[in-house]
Each structure stands twice: as structure tokens, then as C-alpha cells.
Amino acid sequence: MAMNQMSRPPFASPAEWEDAYRQGTPPWDVGVPHSELIRVLDEGHFRSGTVLELGCGSGADAVYLARRRFEVTAVDCSPIALERARLRAEQQDALLRFVLEDVFEFARSAGQFDIVYDAGFYHFIRLLNLQKYLDMLWRVTRPGSYFFCLAGATDNAAEEGPPRVSSDEIHNELGRLFEVLQARRTRIESTSRSNGYSGWSCLMRRPIAAAK
Ligand SMILES: C[S@@+](CC[C@H](N)C(=O)[O-])C[C@H]1O[C@@H](n2cnc3c(N)ncnc32)[C@H](O)[C@@H]1O
């Protein structure tokens, strides 16, 4: 059954995420930066600043961002994933900050970031507690902050793969906080399928209040 048809996602607790990494390489953990992240950076939407990655997993994107000279804080609740991420950073001579913590706890005192990045967390957490997720995003951004998100897309309901979100859901949910600058159809890389899965690449920005 496709994940978006389930009432409870298969990964709903830190122990379940940890189990996925303990069992080997989960399907989302492709070990190289997402091509959409590279595209957005190459297009120059943002060139420097502080980045918070929510649910960084084994760190391929976080390390890539650090090597492109962003000041990166990467948070994940899985000790195994973060151990792999730290090793990756060491092997690639990347300097960044990894935090082993629940992102919601972390966000209470983390302050605001120029860019918040989420590859594959939103489409799970929205099924459990969307409001908590939005409150957290509000805390870690300020007017002018960017939010960049990769999420599964509703294409083929029978298809296996990550949970899926529609364009309307993205606009109705994330659009409460952010102006949608780009919502592009893309493929999300996966270890379990050579051409990946249908997804969204969403670039958003928290509005800057107009001067009076
Ligand atoms: C689908 S995976 C994506 C990982 C990574 N972004 C990637 O693309 O490879 C979601 C990640 O979020 C982490 N995660 C889930 N809930 C979390 C929470 N409450 N706090 C911190 N990390 C969490 C999981 O451990 C997992 O690594």
C-alpha cells in the first residue's frame, strides 16, 4: 500500500527512524546530495548564510551545503544516522554542526536561520502533527528566511514510495507561513528505484512586512 493511504506513517517515532538506519540503508538515504538542492544552489537563490536542516539523516545534503560555504546546523533524532553523517563530514573535510535531538525540542531555543531545509521530513510529520511542524518552522525562521522542501507528490496512488502531498496541500499548509516562490515537479532519488519517485521541490520565503 502506498504510504499516503495509511493513517499512521510507518515512521512515527524516533525508535522507528533509528530502526530503519539500523537495518541498513533506508530507501531515502542515497548518499549523495539531492539533485534539486544542487539546482537551487546553482541557480543562486541563496549564496551564503545560516542553514538549518531538519532531519538530516546521514548528512549528504548537510555536508554538501557546508562545502558550499553555508554555515550549517543539521539536526536528526537518530544516533546511527548522525554517526554516519559525522563520518561523512570528516571524510569530506566539511565543517558543520550536527545536533542529535528532536527538532521540536531543538527549535525551542535555536533562534532563526536564513534558510531552513527539509528533504523528506514534512511529508511524514504532516500526517502526525502538522500544526506542531508549522509552529516549529515559525520559530526557526524570520521574515525573509527561505524554506526549501522536498516532498513526495501525488502522481500514481498505487505506487510505492514516500508519502505524497498535493499542490493544494502544499499551498494550504506551508502557504500559511511562506510565499511559494517555486513548486516544481521533480524526481526524488531513492535507493529502491533507479529513477526515483515523483516529488515536489518547493522553494518558499517568509514574507517581509511591507514598510509603512
Ligand atoms: C525520510 S528521512 C530523510 C533524511 C534526509 N533528509 C535524507 O534525505 O536522506 C527523515 C529523517 O528525519 C529524522 N527525524 C524524524 N523525526 C525527527 C524528529 N522529531 N527530530 C529530528 N529528526 C527527526 C529521521 O531520523 C530521518 O533521518
Image (spheres, rainbow, N blue to C red):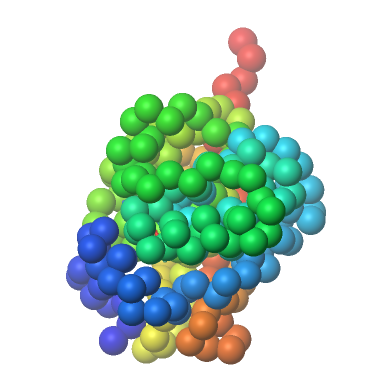
Which residue, as the protein is rendered here, is positioned at the far right? 43
Q: Is residue 39 left or right of residue 169?
A: right
Q: Position of residue 152 (x, y in %)?
A: 46, 70
Q: Say which of 91 and 119 sits in front.
A: 91
Q: Position of residue 196 (x, y in %)?
A: 55, 82
Residue, x 62% and y 70% (percent of image)?
A: 32
Quadrant, the N terminus? bottom left
- Residue 183: image quadrant is bottom right
Q: Position of residue 194 (x, y in %)?
A: 58, 89
- Residue 160: image quadrant is bottom left
- Residue 110: image quadrant is top left
Ligand 1 shows up in the quarter that is bottom left
Query: Considering only vertical position in the picture, is 61 above or below 69?
Result: below
Q: Say which of 52 and 60 sits in front.
A: 60
Residue 202 seen in the figure: no
Residue, x 44% and y 59% (percent of image)?
A: 83
Residue, x 48% and y 87% (percent of image)?
A: 192
Q: Is residue 8 left or right of residue 42?
A: left
